[in-house]
Image: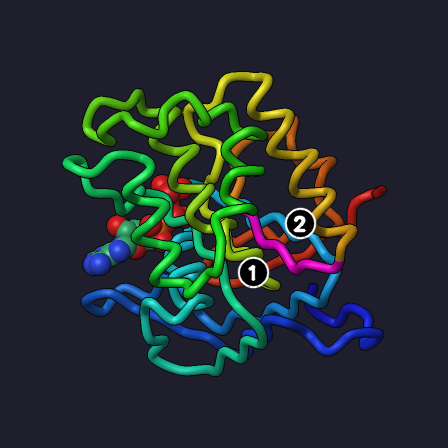
Amino acid sequence: MQGATTRHRPRLSISGVCKEYGGRQVLRGVDLDVPAGTLVGVVGENGAGKSTLLRIAVGHLAPDRGTVTRTGAVGYCPQRAVLNDAFTVGQHLRLFQMAYRLATLERAGELMELLALTGCRRQRVGELSGGTRQKLNLLIALMHDPQLLVLDEPYQGFDWDTHQRFWTLAADLRDQGRSIIVVSHLLHDLHHFDAIAQLRQGRLHFEETNR
Ligand SMILES: Nc1ncnc2c1ncn2[C@@H]1O[C@H](COP(=O)(O)OP(=O)(O)OP(=O)(O)O)[C@@H](O)[C@H]1O
């Protein structure tokens, strides 16, 4: 949260970030600090620049100006899942186990249970429903238990029970001290956030919530 507490050193600190595409300015000086134990919502109209901001936050895209500082491991759930249709769910888990250098898939197994994915382990990703693909996309972002979670509309296509379980999980992770950013379009989800950052005309406008 901008101007928020200095209790904790922010896990993510974005300062004066600007980005344009082909002469069109999308971000015009964005500042955002996300301390440990904070769940921040980023909202805004379609095309406001939310995904652009998150891609810059995780280092997938370079800003034209401004700085981004991150500490600790990052878990990024992109808006569009980057999965290989020919591989099974289990093969994805083993691939990311190597990429994250995890000794075991214990945490992935817990998340599989929580997201009701356990029965899909042997299925090829190309055969999964949209919501189930999205569960795997989220699981891959969380399976290494990162300190900073950057989640771009992570519950697209989730059924209501899974949607509710996602918010319980997000609150637990926040309470354990993780820093979490979630892009959301759903008005009925805004009460879950500690702060809401609205992206308007290339700048973030902050609202505290009653949480
Ligand atoms: N690689 C790119 N090249 C050119 N323009 C882009 C590129 N990526 C995004 N844009 C444009 O930048 C603007 C912001 O896009 P972005 O995807 O960040 O918005 P968003 O707020 O996440 O939108 P949505 O709510 O629809 O997901 C849009 O006008 C989009 O067309």
The verdict on label 1 being within 8 Å of ligand 1 is no
The answer to whether 97 is drawn above or below residue 134 in the figure is below
Asked which quadrant contains residue 58, the reply is bottom left
Depicted 181 relative to depicted 160: above or below:
below
**Numbered circles on residues, count:** 2
Kind of residue at disc 2? Ile
Q: Write the start and end of the magenta stretch as one range.
A: 177-182
**What's the image's color scheme?**
rainbow
Q: Which residue is drawn at 38% across and 41% down?
A: 137
> Helix, strand, or loop for circle 2?
strand
Q: Which residue is at a point 51% across and 23% down the rendered structure image?
A: 116
Ligand 1 within 8 Å of disc 2? The answer is no
* Residue 170 pos. (x, y %): 65, 43
User: Whole-percent x and y of residue 206?
Assistant: 68, 56
Q: Residue 64, located in which quarter of the rendered image?
A: bottom left
Q: Residue 146: which numbered mark, if any?
A: 1
Is label 2 or label 1 in front? 1
Identity of the residue furthest to the front in this view: 103
Q: How crowded is mark 2: few (under 14 residues within 10 Å), some or many (20 or more)?
A: many
Residue beneath the point at 19% across and 28% down: 126
Residue underneath mark 2: 196
Instruction: Give the mark, 2 or 1, whose residue is nearer the N terminus.
Output: 1
Q: What residue type is labelled 1?
A: Pro
Provide the major secondary structure of the magenta segment: strand
Decide whether residue 8 is among the magenta residues.
no
Residue toward you, 198 or 169: 169
Left or right of 179, for residue 28:
left
